[in-house]
Image (cartoon, rainbow, N blue to C red):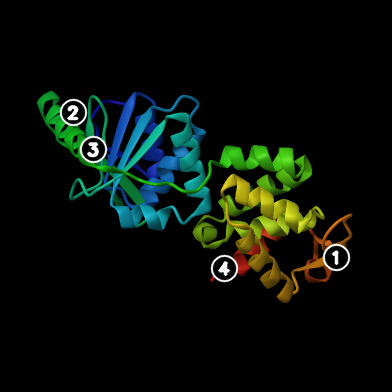
């Protein structure tokens, strides 16, 4: 790739993959939600991603980070030091700035383009301008836990079979890109837990400890899924105190109990 040359493709992922091949640092300014999604996807796939800084409008970030897949992946990159996120409007167009080039990102229909410039003085002026705006911007509070920590602790505390089903169901949801942002991660987790006969107490305690949601949210979601006939519970006596509830799928509602079907059920319940 020639620094500053115009780039064309069918997705923002293609543009970012090309830029990542030679960049050591990347500053993405005023992206669309689609561009933020693409950034987390490409960063996850890269074997040696550049250091990335994301400067975006706070309402846009809050909206796009409602998508559990995007938010948990972004949290992974923040935790590793690869990604930093700050809020504030910085440009009238979406800009991608590296040490040697500047691109304006455009999307029209099913095509995207990056219009580039590599004049040294111009690139320096742009970089200096947005470096200053970056320094004056506020950090974005990303409250979703890193996906790697979710997966690791789920396997350790609940069981490797449950983790495997969680991964497979989440992958099925990743593939349904047009509907991906419409699912609820607590619903997904409870359905996966029910497939593996996990106690409600155990999965809700894990979920609260890892930072996914409160025990109360898990309990409310369990009740909703039970009322809809998707899951059922059975009482498990304990030595002291009230019996605990074991989650089980209502197999009368499923043709097959596969992660792919759980993903489909999760999406069909989306508002």
Q: Which of the two discs, 2 and 3, sits closer to the camera?
A: 3
Q: Nearer the viewer, mark 3 or mark 4?
A: 3
Residue position marked by numbered label 3 in the rendering: 134
Tag 2–tag 4 contact (CB < 8 Å): no
Among the two numbered marks 1 and 4 on one chain, the one whose residue lies closer to the N terminus: 1
Which numbered disc, 2 or 3, marks the residue that appears first in the sequence? 2
Disc 4 residue crowd, few under 14, some 14–19, many 20+, Cα 10 Å: few
Q: Is residue 196 above or below residue 131?
A: below
From the image, state whether disc 2 or disc 4 is nearer to you: 4
Mark sitting earlier along the chain (2/4)? 2
Say which label, 3 or 1, has the lower sequence index: 3
The residue closer to the viewer here, 101 or 31, is: 31
Using the numbered discs, state the Cα–Cα distance from disc 3 to disc 4 in whole angstroms: 36 Å
Sequence order check: which comes first, mark 1 or mark 2?
2
Q: Which mark is residue 270?
A: 4
Q: Secondary structure at mark 1?
A: strand
Q: Residues within 10 Å of mark 3 (few under 14, many from 20)?
A: many
Distance, label 2 to label 3, CA atoms, is 21 Å
- Crowd around label 2: few <14 · some 14–19 · many ≥20 (10 Å): some
Q: Residue at x 57, y 60 (%)?
A: 184
Mark 1 vs mark 4: give the one in front: 1
Per the model, the C-alpha gap separating discs 1 and 2 is 65 Å
Residue 242 location (% of width, % of height): 82, 63
Where does the N terminus fall, quadrant-wise? top left
Tell me if 203 is positioned left or right of 175 in this view: right
Asked whether disc 2 touches disc 3, contact meaning CB atoms under 8 Å apart, the reply is no
Residue 150 in percent (x, y) is at 61, 43
Q: Is residue 127 above or below residue 158?
A: above
Q: Residue at (70%, 58%) from the top-left corner?
A: 190
Q: Which residue is mark 2?
A: 118
Residue 234's disc number: 1
């Amino acid at each position: 790739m020639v620094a500053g040359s115009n780039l064309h493709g069918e997705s923002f992922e293609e543009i970012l993959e090309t830029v990542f091949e030679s960049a050591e640092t990347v500053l993405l300014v005023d992206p669309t939600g689609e561009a933020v999604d693409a950034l987390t996807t490409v960063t996850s796939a890269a074997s040696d991603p550049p250091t990335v800084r994301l400067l975006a409008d706070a309402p846009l970030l809050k909206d796009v980070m409602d998508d559990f897949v995007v938010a948990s992946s972004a949290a992974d990159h923040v935790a590793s030091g690869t990604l930093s996120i700050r809020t504030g409007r910085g440009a009238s167009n979406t800009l991608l700035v590296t040490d040697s080039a500047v691109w304006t990102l455009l999307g029209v229909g099913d095509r995207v383009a990056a219009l580039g410039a590599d004049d040294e003085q111009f690139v320096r002026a742009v970089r200096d301008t947005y470096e200053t705006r970056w320094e004056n911007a506020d950090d974005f509070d990303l409250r979703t836990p890193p996906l790697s920590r979710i997966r690791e602790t789920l396997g350790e505390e609940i069981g490797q079979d449950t983790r495997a089903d969680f991964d497979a169901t989440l992958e099925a949801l990743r593939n349904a890109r047009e509907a991906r942002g419409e699912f609820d991660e607590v619903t997904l987790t409870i359905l996966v837990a029910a497939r593996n006969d996990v106690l409600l107490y155990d999965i809700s305690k894990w979920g609260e400890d890892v930072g996914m949601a409160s025990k109360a949210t898990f309990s409310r979601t369990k009740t909703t899924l039970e009322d809809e006939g998707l899951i059922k519970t059975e009482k498990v006596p304990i030595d002291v105190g009230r019996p605990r509830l074991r989650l089980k799928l209502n197999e009368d509602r499923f043709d097959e109990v596969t992660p792919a079907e759980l993903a489909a059920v999760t999406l069909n319940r989306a508002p």
